[in-house]
Amino acid sequence: MEPLLVITNDAAGTSDEATLDTALGVLRSRASVEVAATSNPGELDGVLHRAGTRRIVVAGGDGSMHAVIAALHRRNELTGREIGLIPLGTGNDFARSMGIPVDPAEAAVVVLDGTATPTDLLIDEFGDVVVNNVHVGASAQAGRLGAAVKSVIGKVGLGKVGYPIGAALASLRPHVVRLKVEVDGRVVNDLDQQVLMVAVGNGSDVGGGATLNPGAEPTDGMVDVMVSRAVGRLSRLSFAALLSRGQHATHDDVVTARGHTVSVAGEQFWASADGEIHGPERRRTWRVEPGAYLLMVPPAEPQGAPA
């Protein structure tokens, strides 16, 4: 039987534990499974130290996925590593981007029978990684406020509404900054133009389904960039309406680009990378590392198969 190492979040609630047990039942029917609960980087590093060649399965959300990938990257053990993902987070945006079922039992089947697919990673100038998406400006402000809300209401099982509440609060006084944004050395926004937000996407969605970079694919070796210049009140309202439908790229005050390296510099800004808030910053640069690791995803449908 194939050996699997399932890494869980020690802070998960009882509802997550019950759901995880169902997924573990699927895995244990065909594999040898060890479950390791971690709650801090030191514990995670210790678990990875004894992982050996076993396939690692992350049972958690985007934050858990980020923690494991970052730790493996830091240990120089990421290249060629097969990773499985069982979504147990509040948003599961990266899982959706990769077509992994959000039902944990179905995701467990993908861990066993899926295709090991080369998957990209974003790496900044400090060696820190982004698995899904990094964004600055009003969206990061929403993330900061949403995290604060989630820390309170998550205790009563309402964590999933943290980001929407944060977004609503951020819309009252959006964080507008002057930023120079360069993609592969080409200036797509200069300091003379204020921006509402900048989204740098390996994956497409954040915050439980808000599609910031509609065309982003974590397997194409490219990063998708969206710059919103919708700083006026009416422009923000129309941008928000289009954003809710995933059509904001058509807005007159939106610029999109694709490339391999993205730099953002200018006034102080906060960045939200896979839901983790960093800042205040003055300059950050991210580059794509194509096929940095192998993620288990559903097998592709055979050509000519019925929909």
Image (cartoon, rainbow, N blue to C red):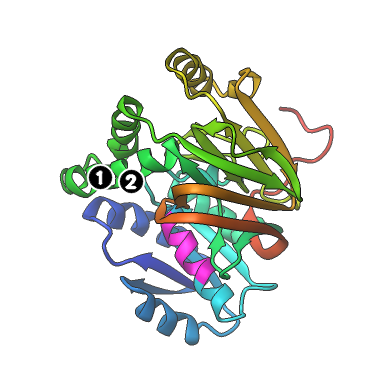
Q: Quadrant of the C terminus?
A: top right
Q: Which residue is mark 1?
A: 150
The spot of residue 57 in percent (x, y) is 50, 65
**Between marks 2 and 1 in the image, the one whose residue lies nearer the viewer:** 2
Label 2 amino acid? Arg
Closer to us: 177 or 222: 177
Whole-Å distance between the Cαs marked 2 and 1?
A: 10 Å
> What residue appears at the point 55 percent right and 34 percent down from the top-left corner?
212
- Give the number of the disc on residue 54: none
Q: Is residue 133 visible?
A: no
Q: Residues within 10 Å of mark 2 (few under 14, many from 20)?
A: many
Magenta stretch: helix, strand or loop mostly: helix
Q: Is residue 11 magenta?
A: no
> What residue appears at the point 62 percent right and 35 percent down from the top-left corner?
226
Q: Earlier in the sequence, mark 2 or mark 1?
A: 2
Asked whether, in this view, residue 3 is left or right of residue 237, the answer is right
Query: Which residues fall within the magenta stretch?
Result: 63-70
Residue 92, compared with residue 171, is above or below; it is below
The spot of residue 214 in percent (x, y) is 63, 32
Closer to us: 44 or 139: 139
Circle 2: element type? helix
